[in-house]
Image: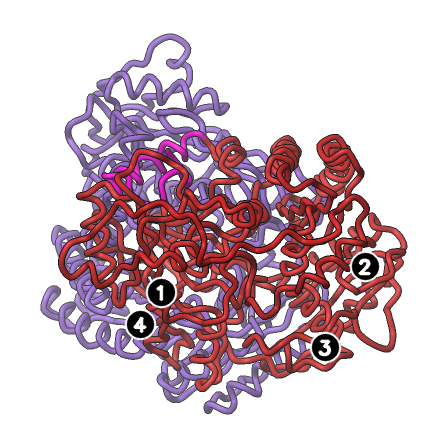
Chain colours: A purple, B red
Amino acid sequence: MADGPTGRSWWGWGNESEQLGDEECAALGALLPGLREHPVPVPDIRRLDLPTPRLAPPGALAELVSADPALRAAHTYGKAFRDVVRVLAGEMAAAPDLVALPRREADVVDLLDWASRENVAVVPFGGGSSVVGGVEYREGDHAGVLSLDLTRLDRVLEVDRESRAARIQAGAFGPALEAQLRPHGYTLRHFPQSFEFSTLGGWLATRAGGHYATGHTHIDDFVESMRVVAPSGVHESWRLPGSGAGPSPDRLFLGSEGALGVITEAWLRVQERPAHKASASVLFDDFPAALRAVRTLAQSGLNPANCRLLDPGEAMLGGAGDGSSSVLVLGFESAGQPVDALLEQALDLVRGHGGRVRTGGGAGGRPAADRGDGSAARPAADPAGAWRSAFLRMPYLRDAMTRMGAVVETFETALTWDRAPELIEAVRTGLGRAVEEITGRPGILNCRLTHVYPDGCAPYFTVIAAGRVGAQRAMWDEIKAAAGEILVRHRATITHHHAVGRDHRTWYDRQRPELFADVLRSAKSSLDPAGILNPGVLVD
Amino acid sequence: MADGPTGRSWWGWGNESEQLGDEECAALGALLPGLREHPVPVPDIRRLDLPTPRLAPPGALAELVSADPALRAAHTYGKAFRDVVRVLAGEMAAAPDLVALPRREADVVDLLDWASRENVAVVPFGGGSSVVGGVEYREGDHAGVLSLDLTRLDRVLEVDRESRAARIQAGAFGPALEAQLRPHGYTLRHFPQSFEFSTLGGWLATRAGGHYATGHTHIDDFVESMRVVAPSGVHESWRLPGSGAGPSPDRLFLGSEGALGVITEAWLRVQERPAHKASASVLFDDFPAALRAVRTLAQSGLNPANCRLLDPGEAMLGGAGDGSSSVLVLGFESAGQPVDALLEQALDLVRGHGGRVRTGGGAGGRPAADRGDGSAARPAADPAGAWRSAFLRMPYLRDAMTRMGAVVETFETALTWDRAPELIEAVRTGLGRAVEEITGRPGILNCRLTHVYPDGCAPYFTVIAAGRVGAQRAMWDEIKAAAGEILVRHRATITHHHAVGRDHRTWYDRQRPELFADVLRSAKSSLDPAGILNPGVLVD
């Protein structure tokens, strides 16, 4: 963070300058009955009550670490609702003893060696944008906690123009990585919602899902090879476009969430920048019909780059609709070929399911700042770009609502088409009832599809309810538990792209095949014999 | 095998009826100087010298196993050149003691329980088409060897039309599986060269590569979920179109080659049958220019279904050329949209690299029998279809040449584009020299690209040299070693789709990251504590 992008919010999402002011918070809060009149104040970072650091690494390592209270505070939690609530309440007892800022991979090796010897828990930290408790130490049996911030490893080290691939350090944030690829005419084209505030290493460790709806979505598919530092040694796989030599070594570390090793760099497939774009939005009166239209589209082979279905409430929340219709935001992109004909084919197809193509103008929302993902260059009439601007604004609104006493939860999943309508309905009714029981009032519950596959989709749910300062965390925990139970009951994954972290462990343990849990435990013992890496994550 | 397709060759590739007769063998052998005048005879399966079985499973298990000598003989080896040579020499000491033919998954559980108790090695067996020693026991410290033939588990159990997915038992051969999907209008569309003679379980266990050049090629990408029986229990993953919940459980078993568990069934993504097809062949005077053309095509986003580049010798061998030019066989397919315009775009692109589109007629080769993959339905003027027919005939020619005393080796790899020209040249010169040293004469050494990716390609090499009956196996081992060394030196994978088995272990051990080897050993201990599953494969 010290050398990383400045102006970040230490307590909430993103950039401090984009957080809502007190009056904006109050105005927003007035839209939901039952909230406070004024937002709770954000604590003064200079007056936090942090525990005294228990660690002092020897010799050269001392230069890599910092006990600066502001830095420790900013490395205490991720950015889940639960995290923001605790920061606002001044609960900082979980702060790491030290934050390490390695300058090179060898520093990571040395830090892990020391930590293994001294029983120091190491929590790998990229952008710190985890919304699942991925970067927060919760155990109690280590001599101390070191937050291992990788953001000084932020370079594109090599570009192979023949193979269209780049070797990139794990600590590079999205915009910095794209800025270094741009002079070569390339893009990684991986744009998760957290793009500005998360790093390549974080994406790899959590199997991040990009912005694109079809085709290669998860970062997994872009990986040629990886370097990973584990306490037991350094892993490096060969750069290969494809291989059939045994189980994929990299697939073990993709999704390992810092519990099996620290990813330091990777060779990734990059792409030429798209030169052709076309998008449209389509209205549906009937959500089940919209679901069928999207399924048909996902199975058509047309492969839209963007294919987000918003239910009426979600469309209204994102400024893409008036609450009466479901909205499908559809976009095509290509570096090589015009895509207008593809968009027309797609529109013909969804019209057959009752879709009405919206004419004249965008999906609403304010224009995006230049985030390095090309979104700002889009004309206002581009529905996909406009919706994306609103989408990127969402987490700031969440933080404002949190300060007003609301309970806000977003959770996501994926499952096959045959079970999707039933699951969505079960969440609407079952979780809707639970929210009312837990908070004493009905809440807002919206759904969108973030990604579609030929065989299924990834539904994403937003819950907003009036809570009570002091009870927000407990209410959120109960809502989270109710949501997790519904997902597990339908055998829908506990996460499509938010990762497991600590907040999803209970349900992950039920989803994960028991034999694979045994394998993960064995792998953990082999790679991290002292059990120092991100304790509590994936396995015990 | 007992209940499986009949008419199979027990000693060589494929169907007995398609093996060349003695006179055809002699005519073929006359094309290569230095071979015998007449083929060595195929041993009489009724007169083989098999060791006495050492095993007798108790009770109900006895009904699942057979000690029939013909069955044991057919389960002794795979179908590598090395295997055929040994069968022709009557070397059958490695025959399994028993062959088990389970009728249901519970039988597999019972057999593994018994084998774990009694220290019986279990070699999972699908079609037995391994060309890497994948189904042959070579260790010595077990009480006996059981070949576990899965081919009675051969049903498509369920089709989910909404999600376009099917639950299929692991022992289904390619044609049987396609025949069961056809009434639903679906195809798995996974056509490895061994399609007729290999099973779904074999494909999954070896990360098989399909016939298609781009897009989803490896079977890995079609898997929604799997069931795997390990000695320590039964693994079942959830059916998910995508997930970010920890490292992928299934990716551990994909490529595990029977060493970590026995795959019994899987849910797979299926597709609608292609309705639109177009193909062409393109000639190049210059192989490096052809490589550049194919690279440009692979990075164009056009995604041809077929994109095989044959060097002049390989084109001649397959009947697709006269030996003066390299030939690119190009094909497009789609279930939904016409593909002629795509083919035209692709042809424009390769013309820019000196490609000359061949007019009027096919790539040569005789028409294919109906193999269940749609190849027979193609008109003779279809270059992709015609080349495929010749391609499917190759292994029979190999067996004929083997009987004539030749040494025949095919090996394949994959690497990024930046290193591909150098590797191909290194194989041509380095291995060419080695072949001459080993056999005393120059051999034939051809190259084709079987698969292309935006970031690299999969070169496939064919070596044919005059050997000497009695020395063929030793010569082949030396050629294999020379090839493996060249691949490892260039950090090209030891296999793109043939798997590791026992024949590639030496080089796999050098390719596989050491930390991942530790993880595999841990996983093996956890899943197969008695060490009975396919001993010698992947780890010791």
Quarter of the rendering containing residue A524: top left
For the residue pair A2 and A152, the one nearer the viewer reads as A152
Label 1 – label 2 distance at C-alpha: 40 Å
Q: Residue at x 52, y 89 (%)?
A: A351
Residue A182 is left or right of residue A317, and the answer is right
Label 4 – label 1 distance at C-alpha: 34 Å
Rendered location of residue B342, percent (x, y): 73, 73
Residue of label 1:
B266
Q: Are marks 2 and 3 on the same chain?
A: yes
Above/below status of A474 relative to B329: above
Q: Are marks 3 and 4 on the same chain?
A: no
Residue of label 4:
A446
Write the start and end of the magenta stretch as one range.
B514-540
Q: Residue at x 54, y 86 (%)?
A: A349
Q: Nearer the viewer, mark 4 or mark 2?
A: 2
Residue of label 3:
B278
Disc 2, SS: helix
Label 3 – label 4 distance at C-alpha: 45 Å
* Amino acid beneath label 3: Ala
Q: Residues within 10 Å of mark 1 (few under 14, many from 20)?
A: many
Above/below status of A432 relative to A527: below
Residue B420 is left or right of residue B50, and the answer is right
Q: Are marks 1 and 2 on the same chain?
A: yes
Rendered location of residue B122, percent (x, y): 31, 48
Q: Residue at x 72, y 67 (%)?
A: B387
Label 2 – label 3 distance at C-alpha: 23 Å
* Amino acid beneath label 4: Asn
For the residue pair B445 and B362, the one nearer the viewer reads as B445
The chain under label 3 reads B
Label 4 – label 2 distance at C-alpha: 62 Å
Q: Quadrant of the N terminus of chain A?
A: top left
The verdict on residue A477 being magenta is no
